[in-house]
Image (cartoon, grey):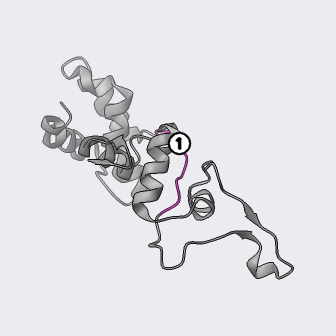
Amino acid sequence: MQKYGQEITPDYLNKLERGSAPLSRASLEVREALRAVLGYNPERWQELTGLYSPSAVPVVSHDPAEQGLQTAPGAPPIAPVVAFRDTPVIIPKELQQVIDEHGDRYPELRDPIVQKIIAAPRNFGGPDNGPQTVEDWYEYFLLTRRYLR
C-alpha cells in the first residue's frame, strides 16, 4: 500500500494493527502517513496514541471540558497504543510435574515461551480454567504440541 509517499506492506500494516510491531517504533514518516490516511489531525493523533506529531498544538481554553488537544470532527475512533507488558509465567504444580517427568522426551516443555503458552488458560482464566490434574496437563500438552512448532 502506498499512500502519502510511504510504502507500507500489508504484512507490516497487519503487525501494526495487532500490536506485534509497535507503532512507536515506526518512522515519523510512516506514522504521519497513517495519521493522514485515518483522517486524524495532529492533535487528535497525539492525544490518542501519545506519539509526537510535528504540528500538534495544545488547545488553551478557560473551559475545563475544552482543555487538551483538538479533535478531528467526525474522525473514527482508534484504540490507544498501549506499551507491551510482559506477563510473568506462573506454572501450576501439576504442569511442573509434567515438565519434570516428560521434559527429557519433549524438550520443548522446558522452553519458557512454550510453558507460557501452555499455562495460559490457568494464568488468564483463573484457577478453575484449563487442565487440573497431571494427566490433564500432559494430554493438553500433547494435543497442543503440534501447534507449538
Residue sitting at 75 percent across and 63 percent down?
58
Residue 46 picture quarter = bottom right
Q: Where does residue 19 sit, x and y in percent of width and height?
A: 41, 47
Q: Main secondary structure of the magenta part?
A: loop
Q: Amino acid at mark 1?
A: Ser
- Residue picked out by circle 1: 24
Q: Magenta stretch?
A: 79-89
Residue 114 visible in this rendered orientation of the protein: yes
Residue 4 position (above or below residue 149): below
Q: Residue furthest top?
A: 104
Residue sitting at 87 percent across and 79 percent down?
62
Residue 69 picture quarter = bottom right
User: Would you say 50 lies left or right of 94 here?
Assistant: right
Q: Residue furthest front?
A: 5
Residue 102 position (above or below residue 56): above
User: Would you say 75 lies left or right of 129 here?
Assistant: right
Q: Where does residue 70 sit, x and y in percent of width and height?
A: 66, 70
Front residue of 117/69: it is: 69
